[in-house]
Amino acid sequence: MKTIDEDIKSGQLKHVYLLFGDERYLLLQYRDKLINALTGREDTMNFTRFEGEETDSAEVVDLAETLPFFSDKRLLLIENSSFFKDNPDRIVEYMSEIPETTYFIFCEKSIDKRGRLYKAIAKNGSAIDFSTMDERTIQTWIVSRFKKEGKQLSAQTLNLFLSRTGSDMGTINMEMEKVISYTGERPVITDEDIRAITSTRIEDKVFEMIDAISVCNQAKALSLYYDLLTLKVAAVKTLNLIARHYKILLTVKSMSSASYNDIAKKAGVASFFVKKYIAQCKNYTLADLKNILEELADLDYAFKRGNLDEQIAVELFIIRHSQ
């Protein structure tokens, strides 16, 4: 990200950029920054977007060879293509022979860094990884954004905000807009503001439910399950979320000596949630977690065969494991 900012500021833009990773909000922000710095979307004669795995490499190269129309730049945006799986020779070779007037932006969710096209772009341009931000980076970004709006919040309120939004930057940005609007001219954001205006995620309810199950607080666990039913969350979806949560716990438990960042990456969660998962893991052995996951897989199979009432089965699972 810093590389792109510096390139735009200096006016020394590279002829090929690859933006990839799970953090779609930031990725799209920087994609648009590059587009605006090069041609802008409104220059339809010199800006072309290709999307999808059916994108034809020959068509891309043919257009790249075409001189821009009344401009000194032609920009090709290529998103979610199959190029990084197939590594077509013509595209790979073209990365080292791009004309002075042609620029490429590739956007992909995941990349194999061993691939020939990735290596060609890394050598001749810039490949930027937009992975989920670490806890400190996200917190700094939130505080900075609120400060620009004349707002401040305590560390406790910041942690509450993140616990309700998760780590997706797009969701965080949307919830921040709501908080800014809700607090009006008032400079200090409170816990009450966060609880009043931010959305409660289904995943948060499931987290609380398993927290209650893990300490045998059966009444709270069942109450949270009934809340989900009231919110019209299907029992089978709740079961899938419970299974996902226990899979994360198994990963965390099996990596107890690893760093938070390594655990977060392997488990597919934000690093600032790892501490909470570790706390839950203390109430389970590895064998417990494996047995629970086997039981959940059996329940899922029985659901699909129509052998069980889904709502009652999930309720019995909660009762059984919170005694």
Image: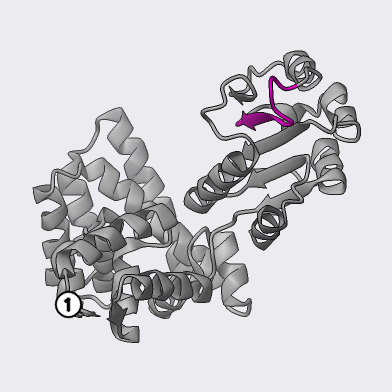
Residue at mark 1: 186
x then y, percent, for residue 11? 72, 51
Task: Classify residue 125 as left or right of residue 40.
Answer: right
Whether the magenta-drawn stretch holds residue 315 is answered as no
Residue 302: image quadrant is top left
Range covered by the magenta-colored residues: 68-80
Residue found 32% across the figure and 31% down from its top: 304
Vertical relation: 143 (above or below) 36: below
Judge the density around disc 1: few (<14), some (14-19), many (≥20) Cα neighbours within 10 Å: few
Amino acid type, mark 1: Arg
Vertical relation: 280 (above or below) 29: below
Residue 196: image quadrant is bottom left
Residue found 38% across the figure and 78% down from its top: 283
Residue found 62% across the figure and 38% down from its top: 107
Vertical relation: 205 (above or below) 38: below
Task: Classify residue 235 as left or right of residue 273.
Answer: left
Foreground residue, 238 or 55? 55
Residue found 62% across the figure and 39% down from its top: 108
x then y, percent, for residue 96? 90, 35
